[in-house]
Image (cartoon, helix red, strand yellow):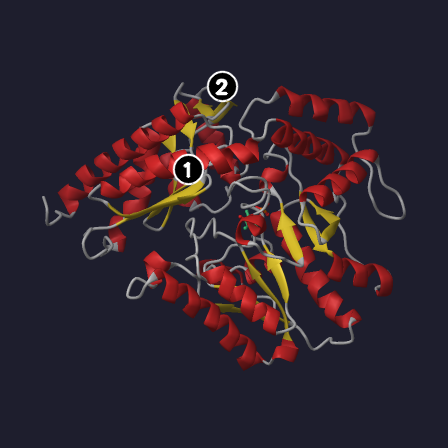
């Protein structure tokens, strides 16, 4: 089959996730056929540096034979069995133990799911169940953040703070409310980072008091927001949030689906920020995306209550702890550990990327360049001095994303924020390549925009 054949069938039969079906049909999809290391290849022979690690997940990069072998062996041994009704199997047991070893000290139990969204469904069920067992069923409210992302199931979408998803998918699950996000460049530049971070934490306290402490079950947040635009909170944010949470009896849910497994240079984002979450939904990097698997890491406080006083928990999935997915995830963790991938991100690759990435801040189109570990963003602006954005109708972000592709690089656009999150096994040379391709795409974007929207400096 040729590219056009795939595109025709795709147009006729395939509804893509998060896609304007009609306009994709008109344009035609890019067909990715194979991949190796940090590179993906399309059906027209283009080699493209995957600056997004798939969808923030291919932490070990593509083409790892060890993961293929782990899947093959497990498929031959036991392709499927469930963990319901007092049964289990070696991969699920070993993975639960391994995750408990890697997780913060107070986290010693794991509930498996099929994805990050499912993990957040489980989180919602567990939080409410926890407070019911504790004799406080009125503690129902979960406080989340605008522009947070917690998945695309009904619970995930409701926990998340993506307005367009709420508009299409609502009414949302009741008992979830949202406060502002610690997005300094987008929403706080009229004050210092420090003051803005504290103000965002104060909004949490105000929300708790408005709802009533005895009505609030939990606060959910990504340590660094991923899908919202690689938003790294000001340094003052998490310490202040921690203080608020300590003051009131409210659970902390750290959504580690992107931050987990090395993205920030620690095993979990919570380690980087010194958080002590009660629940940690994980997925994506757990298997480096080779097979779908998610989980909730459950802290002792919640686990002990569910175990000791909960009776049967009426919740679970056919594929909770799927043996092949679990075997691949376990091998993935072993490789991350033996190759010291997480330490390399923290000590070597993260700082190197930060240095190179910061050079892009000089570009006339860039209002801010930020990164932490191997996640980062560029804010595209029409006026570098004022930070004024381009008119929305210009779709500067989408234009830049398309020009990245054309330049042999995958970056994603979130509005006019360009985000990157490459595989953690990227080399320094490949980081150099990523940065120079990003620069090339920025130049091309500036050139195209100059025609439709002449800049003052032009
Ligand atoms: C991707 C993501 C999810 C949802 O995971 P899926 O596997 O797509 O269901 C949840 N939370 C965060 C922070 C994510 O980035």
Query: In the figure, 131 relative to 254: above or below?
Result: below
- Picture coordinates of residue 26, whole percent (x, y): 37, 38
324 on left or right of 263? right
Question: Would you identify the image quadrant in which residue 221 lies?
Answer: bottom right
Mark 1 / mark 2, whichever is N-terminal: 2
Question: Would you identify the image quadrant in which residue 357 lies?
Answer: top left
Question: Would you identify the image quadrant in which residue 315 lies?
Answer: bottom right
Residue drawn at (28%, 66%), measured in percent from left and top? 190
- Residue at numbered disc 2: 1
Q: Does the residue labelled 2 lie within 8 Å of ligand 1?
A: no
326 on left or right of 194? right
| Residue 154 circle label | none
Seen as rendered, the residue at the extreme right is 86
Mark 1 lies on a secondary structure that is: helix
Front residue of 36 and 428: 428
Front residue of 307 and 150: 307
Residue drawn at (54%, 45%), measured in percent from left and top? 258
Residue 376 shows in the view: yes
Front residue of 241 and 146: 241
Q: How far apart are marks 1 and 2 (CA)?
A: 44 Å
- Tell me the quarter of the image containing the C terminus: top left
Q: What is the number of callouts on the image?
A: 2
Query: In the figure, 413 relative to 254: above or below?
Result: above
| Residue 351 circle label | 1
Residue 175 shows in the view: no
- Picture coordinates of residue 36, whole percent (x, y): 51, 21
């Amino acid at each position: 089959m040729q590219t056009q054949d795939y595109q025709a069938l795709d147009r006729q039969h395939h509804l893509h996730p998060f896609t304007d079906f009609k306009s994709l049909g008109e344009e035609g999809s890019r067909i990715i056929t194979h991949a190796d290391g940090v590179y993906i290849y399309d059906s027209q022979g283009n080699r493209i540096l995957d600056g997004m690690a798939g969808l923030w997940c291919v932490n070990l990069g593509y083409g790892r034979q060890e993961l293929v072998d782990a899947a093959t062996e497990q498929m031959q041994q036991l392709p499927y069995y469930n963990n319901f009704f007092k049964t289990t199997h070696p991969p699920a047991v070993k993975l639960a133990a391994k995750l408990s070893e890697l997780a913060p000290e107070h986290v010693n139990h794991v509930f498996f799911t099929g994805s990050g969204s499912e993990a957040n469904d489980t989180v919602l069920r567990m939080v409410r169940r926890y407070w019911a067992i504790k004799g406080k069923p009125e503690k129902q409210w979960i406080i989340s953040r605008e522009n947070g992302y917690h998945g695309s199931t009904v619970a995930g979408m409701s926990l998340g703070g993506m307005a367009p998803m709420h508009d299409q998918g609502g009414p949302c699950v009741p008992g979830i409310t949202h406060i502002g996000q610690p997005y300094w460049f987008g929403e706080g530049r009229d004050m210092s980072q420090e003051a803005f971070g504290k103000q965002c934490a104060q909004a949490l306290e105000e929300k708790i008091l408005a709802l009533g402490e005895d009505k609030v079950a939990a606060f959910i947040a990504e340590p660094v927001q991923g899908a919202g635009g690689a938003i790294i909170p000001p340094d003052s944010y998490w310490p202040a949030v921690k203080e608020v949470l300590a003051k009131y009896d409210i659970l902390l849910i750290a959504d580690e689906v992107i931050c987990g497994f090395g993205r920030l240079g620690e095993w979990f984002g919570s380690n980087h920020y010194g958080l002590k979450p009660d629940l940690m939904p994980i997925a994506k990097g757990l298997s480096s995306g080779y097979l779908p698997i998610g989980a909730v890491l459950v802290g002792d406080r919640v686990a002990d209550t569910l175990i000791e006083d909960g009776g049967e928990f009426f919740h679970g999935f056919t594929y909770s702890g799927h043996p092949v997915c679990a075997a691949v995830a376990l091998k993935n963790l072993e490789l991350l550990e033996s190759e010291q991938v997480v330490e390399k991100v923290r000590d070597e690759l993260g700082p190197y990327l930060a240095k190179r990435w910061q050079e892009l801040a000089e570009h006339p189109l860039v209002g801010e360049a930020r990164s932490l570990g191997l996640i980062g963003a560029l804010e595209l602006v029409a006026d570098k001095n004022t930070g004024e954005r381009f008119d929305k109708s210009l779709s500067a972000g989408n234009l830049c994303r398309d020009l990245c592709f054309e330049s042999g690089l995958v970056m994603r656009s979130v509005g006019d924020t360009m985000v990157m999150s490459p595989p953690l096994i990227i080399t320094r040379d490949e980081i150099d390549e990523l940065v120079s391709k990003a620069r090339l795409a920025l130049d091309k974007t500036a050139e195209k925009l100059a025609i439709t929207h002449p800049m003052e400096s032009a």
